[in-house]
Image (cartoon, rainbow, N blue to C red):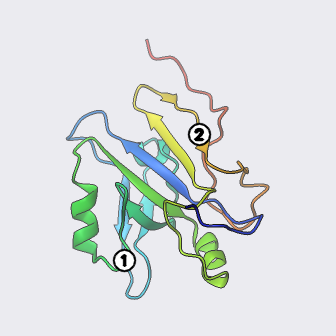
Amino acid sequence: MATSIPEGAPSPRLCLVIKSNPSQEYGYNLHAERGKPQFIGTVDAGSPADHAGLKPGDRIFAVNGHSIIGENHKQVVRRIRENPLQCELLVISEDGEEWYKEHNIPITLSLPNVVRVSFHHSHKKSDSISQGSQKSSEEDPHNASPTPDAHWYAPKVS
């Protein structure tokens, strides 16, 4: 059963990061601070992480379908490396995380407003699928890490 949440709740994003080959980097740095969720440090422009919608400061709550709450940095890195070509991260901005803390709602994959985001390495963005209402970052002031716009321009590769 999905968790009930108040209207206007910021949407966590389920970002599918896809590499074109195992030697390619994902293009983000994973950071950890004592007592806080693991988070995205930097995101390289044009990288698989950038295309998947990851933003610096995003808090990570699940990797490849598994909650990482209580896991150490080494365990999270191991989960990310499970598949050499892709990883799926449940993330939300720091402000979004604070909103959920204030409302005493855990950030999990079962939330009804999780937005799925992926970008295929062939330069075609897949449709974002929302299990609840879709909001742009302008409509959702609690989430400073917007999902990529569904109307991205992607040049054709010859």
View extreme (top): residue:
158
- Residue at the image position 34 percent from the left and 80 percent from the top: 70
Total numbered labels:
2
- Residue at the image position 59 percent from the left and 39 percent from the top: 128
Write down the residue under mark 2. 128
Write down the residue under mark 1. 32
- Residue at the image position 54 percent from the left and 22 percent from the top: 155
Q: Quadrant of the N terminus?
A: bottom right
Q: Is residue 58 above or below residue 119?
A: below
Given the image, on which type of amino acid does mark 1 rest?
Answer: Ala
Assign a secondary structure to mark 1. loop
Between 3 and 93, which is closer to the camera in this rendering? 3
Of marks 1 and 2, which one's residue comes earlier in the chain? 1
> Residue 5, position in %: x, y?
68, 68
> Residue 148, position in %: x, y?
60, 44
The answer to whether residue 45 of the structure is visible from this angle is no
Given the image, on which type of amino acid does mark 2 rest?
Answer: Ser
Please give left or right for residue 47 compared with residue 4 in the image.
left
> Residue 114, position in %: x, y?
58, 55
Q: Quadrant of the C terminus?
A: top left
Per the model, the C-alpha gap separating discs 1 and 2 is: 28 Å
